[in-house]
Amino acid sequence: MRSFQMDANGRARLAALRLLIAALPACIGLASQAQADDIEVEATGRFSIESRWYPESALYPGQRSHASGFTAEPEFYAEDDEGRSLTVSPFLRYDSADSRRSHFDLREAFLLLYGEAEDGEWELRLGVDQVTWGVAELRNLVNIVNQTDLVESPDEKAKLGQPMVHGTWSADWGVTELFIMPWHRQRSFPGRGGRLRSPLVVDVDKATYDSAAEERHLDWAIRYSDSIGPVDLGVSYFYGQSREPALRPAEFLLIPEEEPVPTALHPHYEKIRQFGLDAQLTTGAWLLKLEAIRRLGATNRSTRAHPFGEEDDFGAWTLGVEHAFYSVFETEAEITLLAEWYWDGRGPERATNTFENDLFLAARLALNDVEGTEFTVSVVEDLDHAGRLFGLEGRQRLDDNWLVTVEGTIFEGVDWRGDGLYGVRRDSFVGLKLIYNL
């Protein structure tokens, strides 16, 4: 079996364990009560085996047309009669094609305490946690607390566990959350043998930071959310190391009488500030969605003229609409149609993400049967160039424990070299996953 990735992210897991150790007195209190049989303990989780097939020939040497592997996602939960709880959710993946995709992470490992405070309630989480902000379907602009686990999926939805102190105060006036993050997690990137990677391999061991404290920089964030009639509203502010690194040339091939040619990249993490807004209006079967950010201190895409990029404060937003049709053809089935428009103020030449001016359309069919059968088809259309991305997802339960899912991605017409998808234009794939839920 290939060795698992142990770098700065491994040190982050050690930092998280130190945070848990700081909370050991309360944990010991929970454990001691177990002897008195007044503590509830649960063990759940999911295990899966999966395969991916890439029908087109690879662009880069060492890449394979097939990859398979397995994942283990157990979860352990303990709660005493006073409501204090401990949650631990490790994650393990093995991949036959990409050694970097074989990795271990501590997705969650936190102690939860709560109580009453004046006219509301307070909650405190200590340890490693995952937080999700936003209302959009394809990509959440405001979701910045957790680092992206890019080797899991290129859609950036999978996240690494983040060491944090997470305090919440909720009352009739809304919910206020404060996050203190003592350790920065580096983004994971596919290795040389992995598909869905950039033309140049990202050397994660050569990561650099704006801050002299590097991974130990103290990040923090605050968020206020509330429901005002039919509107769900969230306002957030983040200060700390960026979760989206600037990719800079790390190694060069020297050719006589020519400019040095980069052969690898290294991630650079700037100190940034981000203001975020997410809102959703619910009216009958309609959902209207908005996500918007203003990010200060980030670096735009590197070019030949500016190989390390330039600082570029920018704004970006997503507008979306969703409509559900119930009892289709007088059955239990329902169809949901979705449309979202993604816009990035830096434009296609300077934006560091793939979706800088793109339209997302999708249709989801849920049969609402005993097996929970669902199918989703989607397309992302680049409004500046001709490229598009087709997606297919399907899932069905086989029994109370077994679930099968299928996914497919097709890259079509990605011909512009500046497109973020240009380096993966031959990486269309079909994936099959068999999942066992405890």
Image (spheres, grey):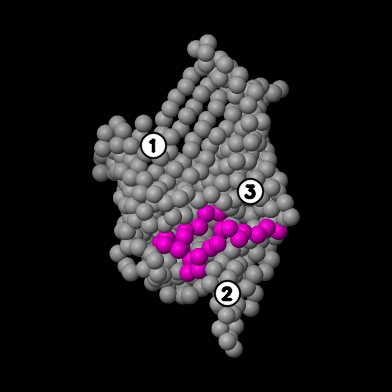
Label 2 environment density (alpha carbons within 10 Å; few <14, some 14–19, many ≥20): few
The span from disc 3 to disc 1 (Cα, nearest Å) is: 28 Å
- Residue mark closest to the camera, 1 vs 2: 2
Q: Which mark is residue 184?
A: 3
Q: Please tell me the numbered disc located at residue 252.
A: 2
Looking at the image, which residue is at 34% across and 56% down? 67
Q: Quadrant of residue 296?
A: bottom right
- 310 vs 371, nearest the viewer: 310
Quarter containing the C terminus: top left
Residue 294 within the segment the image draws in magenta: no
C-alpha separation, residue under disc 1 versus residue under disc 2 = 44 Å
Residue 53 sits in quarter: bottom left
* Residue at image location 36% in from the left, 45% down from the top: 70
Residue under the point 55% across and 27% down? 86
Counting residues from the start of the chain, the first of labels 2 and 3 encountered is 3
> Which contiguous range is marked in magenta?
187-210
Q: Residues within 10 Å of mark 3 (few under 14, many from 20)?
A: many
Rendering coords of residue 328 (x, y %)? 29, 43
